[in-house]
Amino acid sequence: MTEPRVVLEARDLKAGFGSTTVLHGTSLIVREGEVAAVLGLNGAGKSVTMKVLAGLVPVWKGTIMLDGEEIQNVEAEQRVGLGLVSMTQGRQVFPDLSVEQNLRLGAYLSRKRNRRRYGTNLESMYERFPRLAERRKQLAGTMSGGEQAILALARALMAEPKVLLIDEPTAGLAPVVVEGFLETLREINASGLTMLLVEQNVPFALRLAKHAHIMQRGRIVYESEVDSMDHQAMVRYLGIGRLLAPTVAAAGASTNGRAPAKGKARKAPPRKKS
């Protein structure tokens, strides 16, 4: 079976804030039609990686490739136009605007390209998410956390992404809402949309993703297909492993008989001397 093509790639990214380096050579790839996850403890650099990919934090060194083209020097708005779209951490809907106004803002660039598609895309969002259709005139800030999460997702989809960057989507959501959101993301991925997910909720990420990257101190130190992850590596890098065995096994059962790929550990970053 032919390997899906690489649609998003980061090579040796270095970035940070002021004199503080956060990413020390981050590299990863995301293949077309798949969900890839970046996992790691707090402070590992996961969300900074997403901001660098989206163009919200500048690259100091390294390369970002989207569909084979370098974009590390492309402005954030232009990256959205090229198909790299973010659902940011904390959802960040516009609370004083209605549901429909939030969706309209998500389609800002796509409307400039093709105004006629806006109406079609809007109706498709309402068909996919009937709750939003019922509340299209409601102020986003008066909605529940789960409803705001769906609105933030729909707003990102209005930009017609090739790759959707999703940063901590389950933060602050009740377990029952998380379960529903998982199914929603699965359905969207099944339609062909490529996703890169950063998530602190490791079981959620492993149930959704095909490929996982574990991050530590600003580098990817281990990567594997989810159905063949090394539990000892999970213990070493995340402090978990045995407890997630059922989750990994369930994920592997959904691979339709594919031969599992072996996980690959990368050289861990050197510890700083105190």
Image (tube, rainbow, N blue to C red):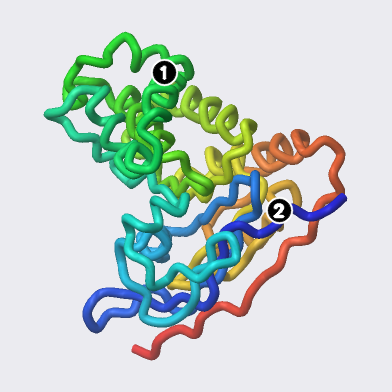
Q: Which residue is mark 2?
A: 225
Q: Is residue 274 left or right of residue 176?
A: left
Q: Which residue is mark 1?
A: 123
Identified at 30% across, 28% down, the residue is: 148
Label 2 vs 1, first from the N-terminus: 1
Question: In the image shown, does 2 or 228 lie closer to the viewer?
Answer: 2
- Closer to us: mark 2 or mark 1? 1
> Residue 243, can we see it?
no
Q: CA distance from mark 2 to mark 1?
A: 36 Å
Q: Height in image: 28 above or below 241?
A: below
Mark 1 surroundings within 10 Å by alpha-carbon count, few (fewer than 14), some (14 through 19), many (20 or more): few
Which image quarter: residue 217?
bottom left
Q: Is residue 195 left or right of residue 60?
A: right
Identified at 40% across, 51% down, the residue is: 81
Residue at disc 1, secondary structure: helix
Residue at disc 2, secondary structure: strand
Q: Residue furthest left?
A: 96
Residue 95, position as x, y percentages in the image: 16, 30
Question: In the image shown, does 209 or 155 lie closer to the viewer?
Answer: 155
> Residue 244, can we see it?
yes
Residue 76, position as x, y percentages in the image: 33, 59
Which image quarter: residue 157?
top left
Mark 2 surroundings within 10 Å by alpha-carbon count, few (fewer than 14), some (14 through 19), many (20 or more): many
Q: Is residue 95 left or right of residue 110?
A: left
